Amino acid sequence: MGSIKKARVWVAVGFLLVAIWAAGGCESKLSTMNTFSDYTLGYDTPVDAGLQSQLEQLDGRLRAKYGMTADQTTVGILDLRTLRLAMIHPDREEYAASVAKIGILLAYFQLHAAAATNLDATTRHDLGLMIKASSNEMASQFSHQLGLKEIQQVLNSYHFYDVNHGGGIWVGKHYGRDTERISSPVGGNTHAATVRQLLRFYLLLEQDKLVSPTASKTMREIFASPDIPPDDIKFVKALDGRNVQILRKWGSWESWLHDTAVITGPGRRYILVALTNHSRGDEYLFDLAVAVDDLMIASANGN
């Protein structure tokens, strides 16, 4: 073969290799782009070793500070940018207090197909009061309208409750004085939740996978409800002045003190869930939110 032909062959090979490399690169980029939308949080989803170690150390330090035992906290973090996951006691059912009101919100949109695009201003505001201001009156109004069994059927359809894996999100009582009670099969709670299923709820909401993309968007707007002031406690109080947006549902009843949220700020976006059963739970939640946000900031800065 002459030198000119050899040169042409090598040029052709070169172009082919570049094309293959480019296609692979594009495929890799597309794969990366699709990672968040395809991500699922199941019972076999692995945690990130580094973040898990940091969370366990943080939880241990805060429990020691406030005199809490390992039976009095359950915590989970999902970094929505890197999909790093960390959880402590993720499938231990806890009494959920007002956190379970998110189940009523989901059921409302699941059972009212037109609400995603045709929600009247009064209903939107009332749902916002239930979620952002944690109104028991509004929660009871909607749960009576929907029915407790129907609400739980919706939650079960998304596998937010599983008797074989510690329970999950359960709505078995109207909020306020009412005789109708349906206790959760696992823990016997009238309102219940687990860290894993709360993380899943917010993940699916962020992925536009609760009811429909339009319904998910409308539910996020209800969580935000700019016309309703946030309750300045727990995570919101802790992260004040940190330039973050917080979509959250907190809960408090006696010593059951919880907060759950999607937190978004410069260079960071993550889900934080913490359920406590201790009189100093709110102090734990405050310190936890600050420390976790510091971890997310450090991660965003490459530290």
Image (cartoon, rainbow, N blue to C red):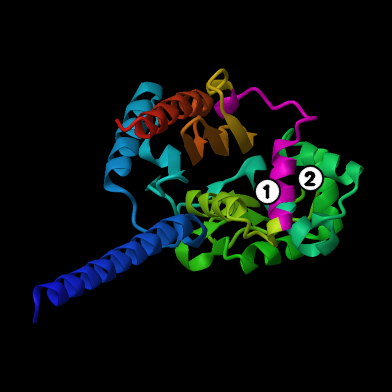
Name the residue furthest bottom: 1
Question: According to the image, label 1 marks what residue?
Answer: 102
Q: How many marks?
A: 2
Residue 146's disc number: none
Side (left or right) of 239 relative to 146: left
Instruction: Mark 1: give few (<14), some (14-19) or many (20+) Cα within 10 Å.
Output: many
Residue range of the region highlighted in magenta in the rendering: 214-236
Residue 24 vertical placement versus 269 (above, below):
below
Depth check: give the residue in front, 180 or 156. 156
Location of residue 31 (image quadrant): bottom left
Mark toward the viewer: 2 or 1: 1
Side (left or right) of 79 relative to 253: left
Name the residue furthest top: 241
| Quadrant where the C terminus is found in the figure | top left
Residue 162 vertical placement versus 253 (above, below):
below
The residue that appears at 29% across and 33% down in the rendered structure is 57
Q: Pointer 2 and pointer 1: residues touching (CB < 8 Å)?
A: no
Where is residue 182? Give x, y as percent.
69, 59
Instruction: Mark 2: give few (<14), some (14-19) or many (20+) Cα within 10 Å.
Output: many
Depth check: give the residue in front, 296 or 129. 296
What is the chief secondary structure element of the magenta stretch? Answer: helix
The answer to whether residue 172 of the structure is visible from this angle is no
The residue that appears at 32% across and 67% down in the rendered structure is 19
Q: Is residue 219 magenta?
A: yes
| Quadrant where the N terminus is found in the figure | bottom left
Depth check: give the residue in front, 228 or 213. 213
Where is residue 97? Give x, y as percent.
64, 42
Where is residue 38? Give x, y as percent.
49, 62
Residue 139's disc number: 2
The residue that appears at 56% across and 32% down in the rendered structure is 255
- Between discs 2 and 1, the one toward the N terminus: 1
